[in-house]
Amino acid sequence: MPRAIGINHVALEVGDIEAAVELYRGLFGFPLRGQVPGAAFLDMGDQFIALAEGGRQAPDEKRHFGLVVDSLDTARRALETAGAEILTGRGLDFRDPWGNHVQLVEYGDIQFAKTQSVLEAMRLSDLEKSEAARAELREKGFMGGHH
């Protein structure tokens, strides 16, 4: 049977490609990978986000995707500056103008890990994992060192 080994990209439906590119690039500094009529692709290291113009549906409540950031404090300030709809509850969640629910988690606190070469290419080689995250990675056999 095939084994899933990661997520290549997340696709989001948005009502306005140009506005969505401006919002997501402004919030997170995603480089524009490419654009075609009705879609845009934003690089996130070795992964990407695909934005596609689509129909309108009710805003996502429970359905969401988790985006890893270097700093939740910096992310909160960027969301506040952008006037984003920050959702109440545990953690830092927001909803974009098209109803997509995004949960932000901090790199240092979770088991998700980029290779050192990808971190260096993203100019993030100084990111450190918390002891709890390192223990979780070691327990699963994913980590021996300190990154």
Image (cartoon, rainbow, N blue to C red):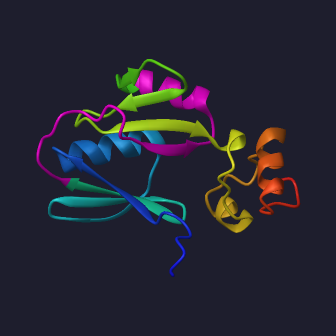
Q: In this view, does 51 lie to the left or right of 33?
A: left
The residue positioned farthest toward the bottom in the image shown: 1
From what the image shows, is residue 8 above or below residue 74? below
The image position of residue 63, as x and y in percent, is 35, 40
Give the farthest residue toward the front.
1
Q: Which residue is drawn at the image coordinates 80% and 39% (left, top)?
A: 132
Q: In this view, does 17 lie to the left or right of 66?
A: left
Residue drawn at x 34%, y 22% as measured from the top left: 83
For the magenta stretch, what is the residue range?
53-81
- 104 inside magenta stretch: no
Above-or-below relation of 54 to 47: above
* 65 to 11, vertically: above or below: above
74 versus 114 height, above or below: above
| In the image, farthest residue toward the left | 55
The picture places residue 24, in percent across and down from the top left corner, at: 37, 43
Quadrant position of the C terminus in the picture: bottom right
> Do we see residue 130 in this rendering?
no
- Residue at position x 82%, y 54% in the image: 139
Give how far across and how far down residue 36 sits, in percent.
Answer: 20, 66
